[in-house]
Image (cartoon, grey):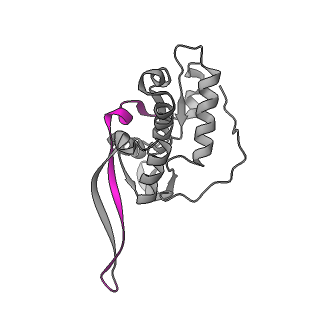
Amino acid sequence: MRVNSINNQQYTNPAFGSFYRNVYLPTEGHLTQKVLHRNNTWLFRPSTEYWSALTFFLIDKYKNVPKVNIYDYACSSGHEAYSIVMQFISKLGVQKAEKFFPVIAKDYDEFVINMAKTGKFDLDPSEHNLINRVTCGNADDFVKLDHMHEYWNDENSQCIGSIGVYNATPLLKDRVNFSVANILDDYKKIKP
């Protein structure tokens, strides 16, 4: 199945947009080639309206189907897969949404898949409020605060902001299966 964008919205600026890391690629048996690796992901990307429209579209399209497989390739650290789960549960309730789970989330980068499997991610207050809005006030059903991390200005030793480190609850985490895969190798194996 191919799902095309069903709105013409522009991308919004996320609170969590990207993270960068150096990756060393083997060159004739030695780790010598250094490349910059970038992952872009955030909750409800590109917009909450997109996710809501997509969710209603899929609910209607597959209303008479007992099981639906949702594949999320290039899932990065899982924000988009988690967005799908939150949308379906919020719109249908847990029992009716189960036919869409687990979301099968894959990325070729083992590092980010391992991050995703932890179910731990950063949220600033606006992102937590967004989850609360999208889930009709039920953000705590999906994410629980682990601890706060403060950012400091080294020049004047003032706190310039904070971000929460959250854990996905079992309601969220147990409905996504993360694994390493490349869509170019995997597409022939995808089940409808």
Residue 159 x/y as whole percent: 33, 75
Query: In which quarter of the view is residue 185 placed?
Result: top right
Q: Is residue 28 visible?
A: no
Q: Residue furthest right?
A: 8
Q: As rendered, which of 1 and 125 lies closer to the eye?
A: 125
Q: Give the residue displayed 47% in from the left and 57% down from the top.
A: 16
Question: What's drawn in magenta, residue-wise?
Answer: 155-180
Q: Position of residue 188 (x, y in %)?
A: 60, 22
Q: Position of residue 74 (x, y in %)?
A: 53, 41
Q: In the rendered view, tell whether residue 24 sits above or below residue 113.
A: below
Residue at image point 47% right, 45% down: 79
Residue 153 versus residue 86 in the image, above or below: below
SS majority, magenta: strand
Residue 157 versus residue 115: which sits nearer the camera? 157
**Number of marks in the rendered image:** 0
Asked if residue 70 lies in the magenta stretch, the reply is no
* Residue closer to the observer: 78 or 172: 172
Specify whether residue 96 is in view.
Answer: yes
Q: Which residue sits furthest bottom?
A: 156
**Quarter of the C terminus within the rendering:** top right
Q: Please provide percent x and percent y for residue 69.
A: 53, 23
User: The N terminus is located in which quarter?
Assistant: top right
In the foreground, 160 or 39: 160
Asked if the stretch drawn in magenta spans residue 164, the answer is yes
Q: Residue furthest left?
A: 147
Q: Residue at x 47, y 25 (%)?
A: 97
